[in-house]
Structures are given as C-alpha cells and as structure tokens.
Amino acid sequence: DIQVTQSPSSLSASVGDRVTITCRASQSISSYLNWYQQKSGKAPKLLIYGASGLQSGVPSRFSGSGSGTDSTLTISSLQPEDFATYYCQQSYSSPYTFGQGTKLEIK
Amino acid sequence: QVQLQESGPGLVKPSETLSLTCTVSGGSISSYYWSWIRQPPGKGLEWIGYIYYSGNTNYNPSLKSRVTISLDTSKNQFSLKLTSVTAADTAAYFCARHKGAGHNLTPYDYWGQGTLVTVSS
C-alpha cells in the first residue's frame, strides 16, 4: 500500500493568514493527489484534484501544487469558514489511501 | 445535482453482517465508479472498495475477505455488505462517486452525508 503522511497534524492560525499543509507519499504518485475539507459531522468535500486542479465551486484562495511524492495545499487568506480538518488522498493505485488529517484551528 | 443517500441499520451485533445501501438521485449510476469509505469516530478515512456500473469490483485488501459491494442499476443503488463485524467496524460509512465517467483513479466528487454504524451487543 502507498502510505500518505500529512504535516502538520494540527495548526493554529488567524483569519487572513496564509496556510500551507504538506502531504508526502511513500512512493511516486505522479499528480494523483487530492485534497478534501471536512467539517465536524459532515462528509468530506473535494477541494483540489490531480494535485492542482480546483474543483468547481471551490474558492480561488485554495490552491494545490506538487507531483511525485510531495504535494502542498495552500489557503492564501484564511476565512472563518475554512477552520476544519483537511485530508489528502492518493488515487494513483488501489487501495486508495488518505493522510491522517490536519486540523486547522482558530488562534 | 447528483445526490447520494446511505440507508441501513445504525446498530449491528458483533459477528453479524453490516448491510448498507446508497441511493443515487439526480443522475444515473451508469458509466461511473462508486465507492464506500468509512471513518471511525474521531479518526481518519479508510477506502473500503468500489464498484463500476458494469459490476466490476475492487476491494481494500485489509477488508477483502469480509466485503461485498453490489449494485442495482434499475433502482440506481449500490450496496455494501461487511460480514463478521466487531467493535473495530464501528464507524461512519460514506458512499461516494469517482469524478469523471469511466475513471477509477480519480477523487470522490459527490458524497453521501454518511451514516453511523455502531457494532455492539
């Protein structure tokens, strides 16, 4: 199985801050890396697909980059509704695996 | 707008079979891959398996011996069966669609709201 490791596991930030979350795969996954946002009690929501593709309806303050083993999710200016848990996921090969999550909290 | 809705018992006894159904509305089940994903309380996400509208399936090896995913195209539904459950199978179970018709190496663009299944006597 491909292991996917996110860092940090938690993060405190303020409204307006720029935030970056990193995901590292145990082997090259090309650009088959996706990012989700999950709020408490809700289903995950797709933000970024194929490492850098912005899902329809997602604000442009969210962006993704990377390929190979390393990818990043950046939120350019945090809004109050962005405080949630973020997961990366590799869709390069089955079993499709998720990172352990990054909980983004208000400072 | 595509919508997915999970249904099934919220409580299952140890050693019994967990059975859930996902009903797809606002779009056809045809031409897409459909997955089940679960999340134990307070923990991360685990992919369980997928089914293609043709009936082709692929399961997570960690669960393969206990999992069956099937579909009913006439009802626009697909289902999950997980046998011999234990407390470790207690989780929120989500159904989801793979983005892009005919593609399985893609993320999940539509999700059900999730249903909590508790394994307890």
Image (tube, coloured by chain):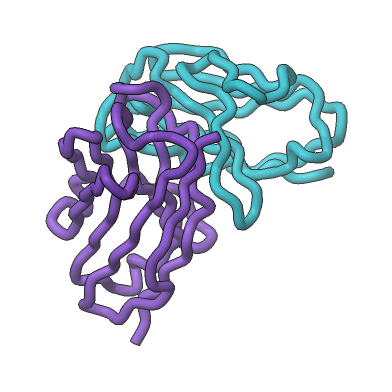
Chain colours: A cyan, B purple
Location of residue B82 in the rendering, given as x and y in whole percent from the top left corner: 24, 62
Assign the N terminus of chain B to one quadrant of the image.
top right
Q: Which residue is drawn at 42% across and 45% down?
A: B24
Location of residue A68 in the rendering, given as x and y in whole percent from the top left corner: 39, 13
Q: Which residue is drawn at 47% across and 61% down?
A: B115
Location of residue B61 in the rendering, given as x and y in whole percent from the top left corner: 18, 46
> Is A51 displayed left or right of A83 in the figure?
left
> Is B30 displayed left or right of A46 in the figure?
left
Residue A5, quarter of picture: top left
Q: Residue at x 39, y 72 (%)?
A: B9
Decide which of A30, A36 is in the foreground and name it: A36
Location of residue B50 in the rendering, given as x and y in whole percent from the top left corner: 27, 40
Residue B104, quarter of picture: top left
Decide which of A66, B105 is in the foreground and name it: B105
Q: How many numbered marks, from 0 up?
A: 0
Assign the C terminus of chain B to one quadrant of the image.
bottom left
Relative vertical location of residue B73 with respect to residue B20 in this rendering, above or below: above
